[in-house]
Amino acid sequence: EILTTLSEVYKACSKENAVEILKNSSDAINNANSFMALFFFSEDGEGFLSTKGQETIDCTIDICSNDVREVIERSLQGEIVVSKIYDSQIFDERLCIYSVPVYEDGEIIGAIAASATLDFFEGIVNEETVMDGKGYIHLLLSNGDFLIRSKNTLIKEDVESIFDGPYLTEEEKAAAQQALDNQESFYGKFRYNDQECHFYMEPLELNGWYIFCANHLWEYVLYYRRIFLIIIGTFCLILAILLFLIYFGYLKFRRNSASLLRLVSQDPVTNAKNTYKFDEEFQEYRKKSNQYSIIALNVHNFKGINDLFGKANGNKVLCYIKDTIDYNLREGEFFCRDAADLFYILMHDIDHQVVSERISQIIYHINKASASYGEYSYELLLYAGVAIQGDREKALVAMQSIQHIHSKSIAFYNQSLHEEVRKKNSIESCMHQALQNKEFKLFLQPKFDLKTNQIIGAEALVRWQKTNGSYRYPNEFIPLFEENGFCVNLDLYMVERVCEQLRTWMDAGMKPIPISINQSKLLFLERNYPKNLKNILDHYQIPSNLITLEILEGIASDNISFLNQQIEILQENGFRVSMDDFGSGYSTLNMLYQLRIDELKLDRGFLKKASVDDEKRRNIILEEVICLAKKLGMVVVAEGIETQQDREKMLNLSCNYGQGYFFEKPMTATDFSKKYVHG
Ligand code: C2E
Ligand code: MG
Ligand code: MG
């Protein structure tokens, strides 16, 4: 490369100048490139020789040794030549000479040559490795002699040629020789130290030289075997993982599909059928016959069993119910368990009487066992809905119509029942939204002093005004709200509306009229109730003596002492407390004396038409009750005064106040304000 560069530079200069420059720089060129000598000869054989460490001399090509001369002459013919190795006459070194032609105007006008030691080649053969570092390269001459032998040799003995020594068989030698003659690559084997070895030679296309490499076959094999083993190992590992995953997946699938299969047909708690399986069999059955009844069976307050005895025992009860049903069914009848404690049964009977008796029998058996259940005794009260030739949904509707423990335990489906349940569901689905939409309106019905006919207060009554303007009356939804607990929200909402109304009157400089508000039993039993009430009143800045709280008499039967405690707190806070609908339920005189209330509201049932004799007896009771109440410090209000006679009668019985259609029907707060509230 360096010589070619010099030749190009030469070409760029004029001829005399170029030789001079080259000659003058030759020492520096030698030193910079570790050349042992630099030659230049023109085509006529004239030139110079610059030997390292000596004077540069002008000379002719004839003074060069044959090896050198041959190379230079070939370059004068246009070749780039690398000489064979020769022994230097001047230095004690084996050298090699490189030579390139020099051109001018496309004509060869001379050759530049340089000699160098073999360090460069040795560097290559000692460092350059093949086969992942396992094999070293040697250089061969065209006759098989080593030109350069790497320090790293397989054969430790000194050998001059690949044909030396006992290593190659005669056949291998002949084959190798033939490859050398033809300048072909060659792969051969030999034995060394009892190990099989192999060698490979590849022609360099330079002076007939070869690259040569020998190695233990087993190392070579080992190398590839290791790669092979790694590949196989990796493959096996992947295969094993795959197989494991497939097997694991299969196991999981089997387990899941087994439990899935069970799930689609079986209830995991009792091992009864589930509704899916029930419906499937039901559909099959219906294709064959319409002789059937569907029964929905449930336990009253099953949640209580779970709460009291724990879920595990609750599950045992369910299993017992399942066994009892199973025992009582006939050939071809079947049943399932839906969620919680709800069972569905298909019976072949369609006669009301027969079905009733059979269900009663089941309920009786379950009930009988419940007394001896574990170490506890707990009565299992069941109830059932029947849909003769109906379906599960209808049986459920019938069952849901039974709400109270003390009512009947079996109900049959009919259309009106359906209507009732549908209505109930529709109310429950929109009550929260209705409260937010302020659909619950405040109506007021005044109360009057029976003697003076003066207004002494009003009762707040709720009306549910639907978005289409129509009204729903409290009897349609209050019992449901009491059952589902929503009453608590509604009642406090009504307290707010009342306070709001009182504040409006007061802000307008009017004289506020005291208002009674109906409060549900649930609310009264809440410990925080007095505090919550007070907060509302404080918010609107309403004095609590303007508010009377009406509680239903039925409430009192539960927990008299707690109720009295609440009443006391409310009274301390300035509220008045009234007992509503006295005489409509299980009133006891005991209750009258135990509860420290401010007002007694006589149920309008006292004013119902009755025979003369009954009327007489009733009046005796009324008179005494009124008298007793007054002696206990209560005022008495008669509800349902519809006629002048009603009014006179209650007046004669010394009743203080009256409320009813005779005076006024409940009206909107606006109408009430116009008519009864003045400055
Ligand atoms: P209640 O507290 O005994 O209210 C009196 C009921 O009798 C009202 O029915 C009223 O409209 C009606 N009434 C008034 N005068 C007469 C009359 O001369 N003859 C007849 N036949 N009836 C009369 P309403 O408004 O339908 O309320 C029914 C019940 O609903 C109330 O009975 C009360 O227990 C409950 N209620 C009403 N509003 C609320 C409320 O905001 N919260 C709660 N928890 N219950 C309420
Ligand atoms: Mg009332
Ligand atoms: Mg009442």
Image (cartoon, rainbow, N blue to C red):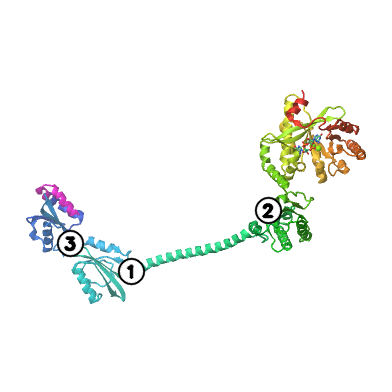
Question: Front-most of 342 and 78?
Answer: 342
The residue to which callout 1 is attached is: 220
Q: Quadrant of residue 52?
A: bottom left
Q: Quadrant of residue 374?
A: bottom right
- Identify the residue shown where x is 74% and y is 45%: 483
Q: Where's residue 360, x and y in %?
A: 77, 57
User: Is 19 inside the magenta-drawn segment?
Assistant: yes
| Numbered badge on residue 392 | 2
* Three-letter amino acid code at the position of disc 3: Cys
Question: Front-most of 410 and 586?
Answer: 410
Left or right relative to 34: residue 57: left
Q: Is mark 3 within 8 Å of ligand 1?
A: no
Question: Front-most of 627 and 110?
Answer: 627
| Numbered badge on residue 96 | 3
Instruction: Report the quarter where the C terminus lies.
Output: top right
* Closer to the eye: label 3 or 2: 2
- Identify the residue shown where x is 80% and y is 39%: 551
Circle nearer the N terminus (1, 2): 1
What's the magenta region? 1-20
Circle nearer the N terminus (3, 2): 3
Q: Where's residue 12, x and y in %?
A: 14, 47
